[in-house]
Amino acid sequence: MRTGLRAALLATVTAALVAGTVTPAVAAESTTGAGSASWTADLAAGDGTGVDTGSGSVVLDPAAAHQAPRDAQSPRGAEGGEDAATGYLTLEPRTLPRPTDQVDSTLDADLPPGSDVTVDVRGRSANGGWTEWIPSTASSPTESTAQLPETTSQVQSRLVLTATPGAEPVVDGLRQDARPTAVSEGAEDATTETAPLRYSVFATREGLVGGTTANGHVIVERDKFVALPSRRALSPRDTNDYSVKVCASNGRCSFAPVWDIGPWNTRDDYWNPGNIRQNWGDLPQGVPQAQAAYRDGYNGGKDQFGRKALNPAGIDLADGVFWDDLGLKDNATVTVEYLWTGSTKLSKVDTAASDDAAADTGSVEVRSAPSDTAAVVGGAADGAAVPILCLTGAWLQIGVGQYLPVGAVPGATAANACGTAG
C-alpha cells in the first residue's frame, strides 16, 4: 500500500502559501506548532545494513539482510517459523530546538503483505550516552509514535525493514515530528548516580566466523563482541553505544560492544523491568525468556519463533571474548553488567592508541593492579565503552581490581586520582 504523505504535504504547503503563513524554502522542513519540530529524514545519508539506498529509496536486500525465523508476534506477517530477512538504516542524529520525549513518524512506503517497516527512535541521555532504541507503536501501517524514556534535545531514528521472501518493502520517505516537552528548571541537573543493571545469565559461544552480524559487522577469528536478544541494545556498526561487562566464575572479565541480536529471541530485553520489557513482561526482571522456557517450560518451552529452547542462554559471546578474555572452555553462567543502563559516563577503548600487541589482537589486557607485571584478569575490546572510575599514575581503574593503561582510552573523562585503597 502507498501512503498519501507527499500529496498531503503538498496540499498543506499550498494552503499555507495562500494564507501567507510560510515560505517555500521552509515548507517541507520547519519548526511548527507550539515549538514542535518537524523534518523529512535524509534517507541517503543513513548508514545501512541489509538494505539498498542507491535508487534514493530504501529497499530491503534479502541477500545481505540478517536472516531469522519470522516473528509469530508480528502484526503483519505470516506464522512463526518461516525465514525472514531484516535490514536496518540508521539515520543521522538530529538536534532539536526544544526538548522532547515523543517522536511521531509517518512513512511513505510500499508494504506488501508479509512485510514490516518499523521506526526505532532513541534520545541522548543526560550522561552523554544514548537511551535504548524504542520501537515506535503503530497507529496505522505507516504512522507510529515512539515514547522516549526521558526528555532529550537530540534524537536519532532507525528504519527496520523485515520481509518474508518475495515481499520486500520499499521506503520512499520518512516524515517526523518531535513534540515539545516542558522541562522544569534544574531538571537536567537532577540525575542521581546509579550503577548499571547486573544479572547472572547463561552464555553460549557464537562462533560463525565469516558470517555477518545484525548490524553489518563481518565476524573474524577471535572476534570481540556480544549478542543480546533484543535490537533495543544493538549498537550501530563499528560503534560502542551499547557495551557490556561480562565476568566468568574464574574472575576474568571482558568489556565488549553489543553487535548482534540473539540468542533465541529478538524482542527480549530481559534486563528491563516488566512494564518496559518489550515482550514477556510477566517474567522476573533479569530472567531471559529462553531460560524460563528451558528450565520452567514457560511458553510451552519455546522461544518467540515457536522453536524449542535447547539451552537457557541470555547472551552470545564472540570467540575472542569466550576463549581469550574469559578463558571459557564450554558454555557457562556469567555475570553481565549492561553498562549503558548506569549513569556513569563511558569512554571508548582504542587499541591502536595503546600498543602494537593490542592493535594486533583487537583487545587491551585488563590488569589486576596498576602495573605491567600485575596479573591479566581479562580484556577490553577495541571500541568497547568502559567506565573510568579514577586515575592512578599511568593507569585507569575501570572496576574493582581492573586497570587499563591510560593510552588505551584517549581523552578519558575521569581525572580524579584513585584513593590509597585503590
Image (spheres, rainbow, N blue to C red):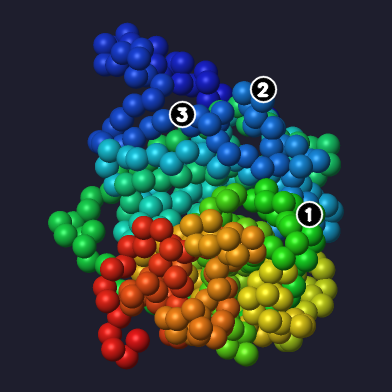
Mark 2 touches mark 1? (CB < 8 Å): no
297 up-or-down from 119: above or below:
below
Q: Residue furthest left?
A: 185
Q: Residues within 10 Å of mark 1 (few under 14, many from 20)?
A: few
Foreground residue among 330 and 287: 330
129 up-or-down from 216: above or below:
below
How much space separates mark 3 and mark 1, taking CA atoms? 34 Å
Q: Is residue 388 visible?
A: yes
Q: Earlier in the sequence, mark 2 or mark 1?
A: 2
Location of mark 3 (residue): 40
256 up-or-down from 62: above or below:
below
Q: Where, quadrant-wise, is the N terminus in this rendering?
A: top right
Location of mark 1 (residue): 211
User: In the figure, residue 185 lies in which quadrant?
Assistant: bottom left
Q: Secondary structure at mark 1?
A: loop
**In the image, which is nearer the foreground, mark 3 or mark 1?**
1
Q: Tag 2: residue type?
A: Ser
How much space separates mark 3 and mark 2, taking CA atoms? 17 Å
